[in-house]
Amino acid sequence: TIDAFQHWVYEHPNHTEEERAAAWTNILATFKIDAIDTSDVATYRQYSWQRQLHLFEVPFYYIEYGIAQLGAIGLWMQYKQNPQQALQNYINALQLGGTKTLPALYEAAGLKFDFSPEHIKTLMQFVKAEMDAL
């Protein structure tokens, strides 16, 4: 929910407080399960996004997890094709530590720093093939 909300906020930079509250409420409803009745705390829930301090302190923090996951899948795909090279690429990236940018770390690991639909589709097809093989 918080990622979808954060995305909405940045896509609508001139939104009003009312629009923001409505967007959050709609996003909550999209991901809501019916197991818990929250109708008696509707006003509280309308502003509950403010509990997520990451929105204020480190915007898009959660997105970094997605970026890391895509890199991990890319490295896994490498490993399935050439285990020794994948391990060496991983070591190459680790040796750089925090001295390089994330795109440079991906490059050192032999990975594309690419979030295009085509590249993500390739990664997801790989994951699906691996799951189908189980």
Image (cartoon, grey):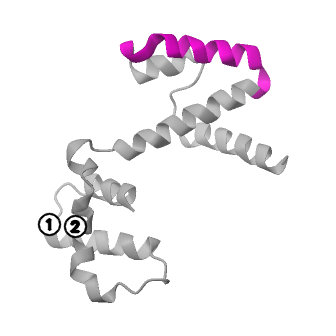
Give the image quarter of residue 46. bottom left
Is label 2 in a helix, a strand or a loop? helix
Q: Mark 2–mark 1 contact, CB under 8 Å? A: yes
Q: Is residue 133 left or right of residue 69?
A: right
Q: Is residue 27 left or right of residue 133?
A: left
> Could you tell me residue 21's position as x and y percent?
22, 71
Q: Is residue 71 above or below residue 5?
A: above
> Could you tell me residue 17's position as x and y percent?
14, 68
The residue positioned 25% from the left and 68% from the top of the image is: 48
For label 2, count other residues whose C-alpha is less than 10 Å away and answer few (under 14), some (14-19) or many (20+): some
The residue positioned 74% from the left and 14% from the top of the image is: 84
The residue positioned 65% from the left and 39% from the top of the image is: 123
Q: Is residue 130 above or below residue 23?
A: above
Residue 16: give its label: 1
Where are the magenta residues, as a range?
80-99
Q: Main secondary structure of the magenta part?
A: helix
> Could you tell me residue 63's position as x and y percent?
41, 44
Numbered circles on residues, count: 2
Q: Is residue 59 above or below residue 9?
A: above
Residue 20: give its label: 2
